[in-house]
Amino acid sequence: MKLRKKVKLVAGTIALILIAFVALGAMGVISFVSSSKLNTYYTNLSSDSVVTIETYGDMNGTFNELRNYLTKVIDRPYSDAQINNVENADTRIKDTFTKIKGTQLDTREASAIKQIEDNYTSYMAVYTDVASKRKAGTIITLEQSNQFATIGASITDEIKKTVANEK
């Protein structure tokens, strides 16, 4: 009888140990899956924000470079090299717009990028007019030059405001 009690006691203890190991294993799997999901969520969240902030910074730098080239188009004799510089910067900025739109934007960000893009389109429309006048040898008026400065400043301010909101 004593032996039978010992066997039952040992079997019960082994069963409890096995149940404890199974429960610990299940808890470990659940913890691992939850941690993986959380890590994926935060990685996606931070990478979108970092990419967007970095991309806005690139756009701001390229836009300031473009403004410099446009100033040279306005106040210097016509040069195909300056026109090519403007076109290259324009292409990079348009690529940046595409890159930003490819990220996950909320309503506020989408509205901000649309406003920046609309202002940029207006800016480049004025440039097209100025470039054709410069090619024809026409001197650009102060009013047209100021129009560039005003639109350019608003674009730069919008980019900076959007980056500040991203942080």
Image (cartoon, rainbow, N blue to C red):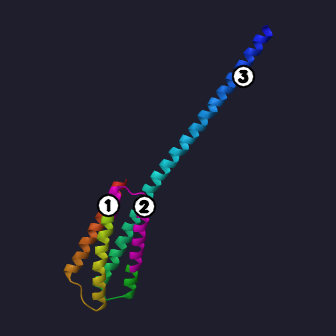
Quarter of the image with the N terminus is: top right
Residue 99, given in percent of the width and then of the height, sits at: 44, 65
Query: Depth-wise, is mark 2 or mark 1 nearer the camera?
Result: 1
Residue 91: quadrant of the picture: bottom left
Instruction: Indicate the secondary structure of the residue bearing disc 1.
Output: helix
Residue at the location (77% across, 15% down)?
7
Pointer 3: what residue?
14
Q: Is residue 116 above or below residue 12?
A: below
Badge number at residue 148: none
Badge number at residue 54: 2
Tell me the kind of residue under disc 3.
Ile
Tell me the kind of residue under disc 2.
Glu
Q: Is residue 14 above or below residue 146?
A: above
> Does the stretch in magenta take in 107?
yes
Q: Earlier in the sequence, mark 3 or mark 2?
A: 3
> Does the stretch in magenta take in 127?
no
Q: Which residues are magenta?
A: 87-113
Residue at the location (66% across, 29% down)?
21
Q: Earlier in the sequence, mark 2 or mark 1?
A: 2
Q: Main secondary structure of the magenta part?
A: helix
Asked if disc 3 and disc 2 are in contact, CB closer than 8 Å, the reply is: no
Disc 2/disc 1 C-alpha distance (Å): 19 Å
Q: Is residue 111 visible?
A: yes
Badge number at residue 111: 1
Instruction: Indicate the secondary structure of the residue bearing disc 3.
Output: helix
